[in-house]
Amino acid sequence: MNTPHEPHDAYLRTYTEPEVTSLIRELHERGKPFGIRWGSVAVNGATVDGRLLVNFGDTSVATLLNLLALLREAGRA
């Protein structure tokens, strides 16, 4: 796996709500074969220091990206 994304990485501020929503859709699709389902996950609309939060425990986009990286890697195995 590549180096994990850190929640304080400045480039995370560039993600827009539509981009994060697209990442969430990808998480749903890639997670299905592994039984990973977050039906209520959505863009929170709130920000911390300019970064969007995602509604599964009000986590950052970095966590979403890290989960996707793991699922992408698992899908290649």
Image (spheres, helix red, strand yellow):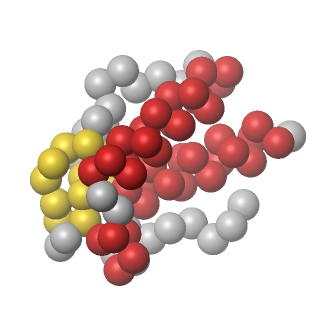
- 33 over 9 or under it: above or below: above
Measuring from the top left, give residue 19's x and y in whole percent: 38, 51
- 46 over 29 or under it: above or below: below
Q: Is residue 57 visible?
A: no
Residue, far front: 18
Measuring from the top left, give residue 69's x and y in whole percent: 62, 52
What is the quadrant of the C terminus in the image? top right
Measuring from the top left, give residue 4's x and y in whole percent: 57, 66
Measuring from the top left, give residue 66's x and y in whole percent: 53, 55
Q: Is residue 53 visible?
A: yes
What is the quadrant of the N terminus in the image? bottom right
**What's the residue at 33%, 70% (across, down)?**
14
* Of 77 and 24, the residue lying toward us: 24
Left or right: 46, with 40 as reference point: left
The answer to which quarter of the image holds residue 16 is bottom left
User: How many circles with numbers are drawn on the protein?
Assistant: 0
Residue, far left: 46
Left or right: 50, with 41 as reference point: left
**What's the residue at 46%, 33% (across, down)?**
25
Residue, far bottom: 10
**What's the residue at 37%, 49% (across, down)?**
20
Left or right: 65, with 55 as reference point: right
The answer to which quarter of the image holds residue 21 is top left
